Amino acid sequence: MDLAESTLILIATILMIAGLMLSFVPVMPGPVLVWAVAIIFAVLEGFQRMTPAAVLVVTLLMIGGSASDLWLPFFGIRTGSLSCQSTLGAFIGGILGTFLIPVPIAGTLLGSVIGALLVEFIHRREVRQAARAGKTAFKMYLLSYAVQLVASIAIFAVYVVSLESTKG
């Protein structure tokens, strides 16, 4: 391994670790940050150390992790805690909360919970069911955060495995 390749690997690894650290901040798009470093590294080194298969895997991990806010709430429908309408209310509430409440994490979380609560209460006129929908929306938000962390870590792991498996 020559000096240029070693330097590139060192810089990419440092940037990926920084991206992983930023992944712990809920408003940061962790999977996208770590993925971007992996893709830039793959392009700069000519897809020799990060093979096209590894790039495909990290891209799928990034999409799944980054889009978890969109697909995870729909699991709430299966648990019976959220109706389709309250899931949509949580999604729209989260978007509105992000823009209307100036505290980023709190705005999205509060908007999501309030959206689910309001829609479920309007739909069923039952406080207990509305509260359950709000609690489920809260859990889904936390689960989405955890999925994004895991996706970021998995992208880094694919990067490390790629480096190790292509040593020459």
Image: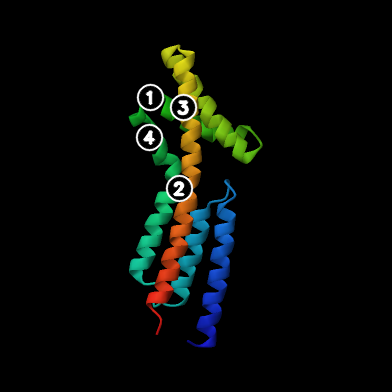
Q: CA distance from mark 2 to mark 3?
A: 21 Å
| Tally of marks | 4
97 over 48 or under it: above or below: above
Q: Which residue is mark 1?
A: 83
Question: Which mark, residue 147?
Answer: 2
Q: CA distance from mark 1 to mark 3?
A: 10 Å
- Residue at coordinates 37% horizontally, 26% vertically from top-left? 84
User: Residue 162 versus residue 35: which sits nearer the camera?
Assistant: 162
Residue 43 rendering spot, x and y as whole percentages: 44, 72
- Helix, strand, or loop for circle 3? helix
Mark found first going from the N terminus, 2 or 3? 3
Mark found first going from the N terminus, 3 or 4? 4
Residue 8 rendering spot, x and y as whole percentages: 53, 77
Question: Which mark, residue 74?
Answer: 4
Does residue 47 appear in this view?
A: no
What's the residue type where badge 4 is placed? Phe
Circle 2 crowding by C-alpha within 10 Å: few under 14, some 14–19, many from 20: many
- Residue at coordinates 56% horizontally, 60% vertically from top-left? 19
Mark found first going from the N terminus, 1 or 3? 1
Q: Are marks 3 and 4 in contact (CB under 8 Å)?
A: no
Residue 94 rendering spot, x and y as whole percentages: 52, 34
User: Residue 41 versus residue 160: which sits nearer the camera?
Assistant: 160
Q: Which residue is mark 3?
A: 89
- Helix, strand, or loop for circle 4? helix
